[in-house]
Image: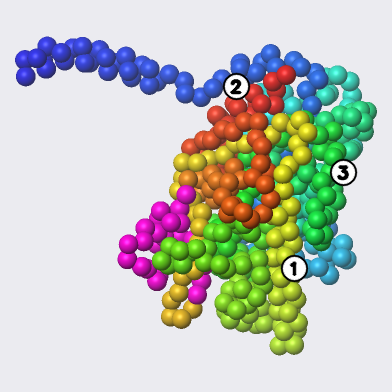
Amino acid sequence: MKTLLRRLPWLLFASVLLAGCGGAATRPDLARLYEEDTRNQAQPPVILIHGLMGSTLVERDTGKEYWPGGLGTLAFSNYRELARVRDVEQRGGGLVPGDLFYGVARTDYYEALIKALEDVGRFRRAEPGQPVRGENDRRRYYVLLYDWRKENIHAVRQLHEMVEQIRRDYRDPDLPVDVLAHSNGGLIASYYLRYGPQDILDRNEFTPWDEGAHRIRRMVLLGTPNLGSVISLERLQQGVKIAFRTVPVEVLATFATPFETLPHPDARVIHGPDGELVDLDIYSVDTWRRHRWGVFSPEVEARVVAAAHGPETGALQLAALHATFARHLERARKLHLALGEPIQSNGVEVALFGGDCTLTPGRAVLDEKDGLRSLVVRPDNVQARVDGVDYERLLMQPGDGLVTRDSQLGRGRVAGMGAAYDSYPFAQTFFLCERHDQLSVNPYFQNNLLHFLLSR
């Protein structure tokens, strides 16, 4: 006790010192770090590509916002207006992208990232078609706003048109751009680098494009599901919850992107309750029809028919929905196989940023209850449990809550299947303790992003 009392003043002094250290700034001073770099007038322009649901959707004719809408929409809407209706779109109506979905309530998705580009990087937002006015007008960034309900190939072609227009605006036919792509946006950028604006998904062979390196200097993939996400399996069976409501399966199935973020065909992520691998083709429509999953479930089919104007119309709409589901599956299979081919980067620097501190669904169990089977991706939801199987260890992997670390790195395909395993050669990788929807606003990501983009 006397020894402790004699040491007490020194312990108090040490604690004061430690408290002083703990009170030091823990965020990087980005403005000071990159002040010198912002004087570089030769800095290439930056194109930001948002992720799934990362842009607003507004009515083409009136500008009325349907996604995300106001707080009333978040609280009460079932988002059936988001369903893609082809005849409406062909007549020139329907929904189109408005602007970035910056955030909701106190949750920021892109605003802090935009602030870092503008206030620290000294980039100014511009629109394609605005000619550059002198040397002081060259530090620009652009936002690729795309309809995230459509196949990614549509956004790929938008990206190509944007790059070509930017070159005309800069009066430089050889100008390269830097691409910053979040989540699903990374699949768009990766496809463009490999194949350009050509649609190769109806082919049996994937012919690479040799022009990517002439148009892109550096590319950033942030939280990109390079091998997909099993959470897409869950969503296509149950819908996706937004705030207090759920976008139902029959709406979600009209979008192409939930299919294009399914697990890679070579990933082999389906297990039985005993933990053993199960040979199940999730890209076969017969698998979904046989198990009565997704749009083939009795509940969904009943809702579709009930919402139609009469049983005949309902039957036609249901048949169309089934056909759309089958087409989305097959096109998504081809997309993943194409993106799994070795990339011809030809000198393009690709940096990977992501999160790996959150246990994230990385596999699925073919579960059974009351004679009905379902694909379960969360340990607590497994019903047909087998003693001795650690379902958390089986199903959960390090990631960002939506995409596993392995998927971001392009790791996890079964040996002997698919293309070579050097499909994703990254110049650098950097992982954070951050969840998927907060990656872009993390100051340590922004610090490393700016270093990657601004370094000469």
First in sequence, mark 1 or 2: give its number: 2
> Can residue 387 be seen from the camera position used here?
yes
Q: Nearer the viewer, residue 340 or 178?
A: 340
Mark carried by residue 30 = 2
Q: CA distance from mark 3 to mark 1?
A: 26 Å
Q: Which residue is mark 3?
A: 161
Q: Is residue 120 above or below residue 227?
A: above
Region in magenta: 373-397
In the picture, measured across the screen, residue 354 lies left or right of residue 170, that is: left
Q: Dot 1 lies on which element?
A: helix
Image quadrant of residue 106?
top right
Task: Assess whether mark 2 and mark 1 are in contact (beta carbons under 8 angstroms).
Answer: no
> Can residue 72 be seen from the camera position used here?
no
First in sequence, mark 3 or 2: give its number: 2
Q: Callout 2 environment at 10 Å: few (<14), some (14 to 19), or many (20+)?
A: some
Amino acid type for the residue under numbered disc 2: Leu
Amino acid type for the residue under numbered disc 3: Glu
- Residue 15 place in picture, x, y as percent: 27, 18
Q: Dot 2 lies on which element?
A: helix
Q: Is residue 292 above or below residue 271?
A: below
Tag in front: 1 or 2: 1
Which quarter of the image is occupied by the N terminus? top left
First in sequence, mark 3 or 1: give its number: 3
Amino acid type for the residue under numbered disc 1: Arg
- Residue 275 place in picture, x, y as percent: 43, 62
- Residue 298 place in picture, x, y as percent: 58, 81
Q: Dot 3 lies on which element?
A: helix
Q: Which residue is mark 1?
A: 327
